[in-house]
Image: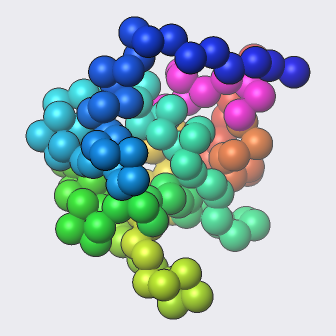
Amino acid sequence: CFKTVSVSAFNVLGEMFIGDQTKKNLNLDMVREIMTPASLAYWYIDDGHKGDAGRYGTYLNTQCFTKHEVEALCNIIQTKFDIECWIRSKKSRNDLPYIVISGHSYETFFNIVRPYVHTSMRHKFPTGSRTQWES
């Protein structure tokens, strides 16, 4: 069980991403500057999920952003972390874009985010020989 708390000190962070309370506002220069291994891990823990069983591809849900913004986010991930990723969309979801992290880059991705993943969130990652959690 947990309880969330509203702390006014965090309002500045909310204002960075939520403009008029109706649409997320993405300042790509700011995202590029603050994107770290920890922020990538927290982003995945919050908005990511593993792909099909037996595969190492993973996904970041970005359907609330424009295709241009998602392309830029994908570019930031590729440039900062050398992770192969691309954009995909599902027609059943109104062609809203999301990011696919290639299974070929899974080990790189996993090694970058692993130190920041709480044990309660490990279920969000593919399991198998390429996922070795430290005790």
Q: Position of residue 107 (x, y in %)?
A: 50, 46
| Rendered location of residue 80, percent (x, y) | 22, 40
Give the residue at x 23% y 38%. 31
Nearer to me, 64 or 99:
64
- Residue found at the far right of this picture: 1
For the point 42% across and 37% down, the residue is 40
Residue drawn at 73 percent across, 50 percent down: 128
Magenta span: predominant SS is helix
Question: Is residue 120 inside the magenta stretch?
Answer: yes
Q: Is residue 123 visible?
A: yes
Asked if 39 appears above or below 88 in the picture, the reply is: above
- The chosen color scheme is rainbow
Which residue is found at the position 34% from the left and 69% from the top?
86
In the image, residue 135 lies at what x, y percent? Answer: 75, 17
Q: Which quarter of the rendering shows the N terminus?
A: top right
Q: Nearer the viewer, residue 19 or 58?
A: 19
- Residue 49 lies, in percent from the top left, at 62, 54
What is the span of residues highlighted in magenta in the rendered image?
112-121
Q: Classify residue 89 as left or right of residue 35.
A: right
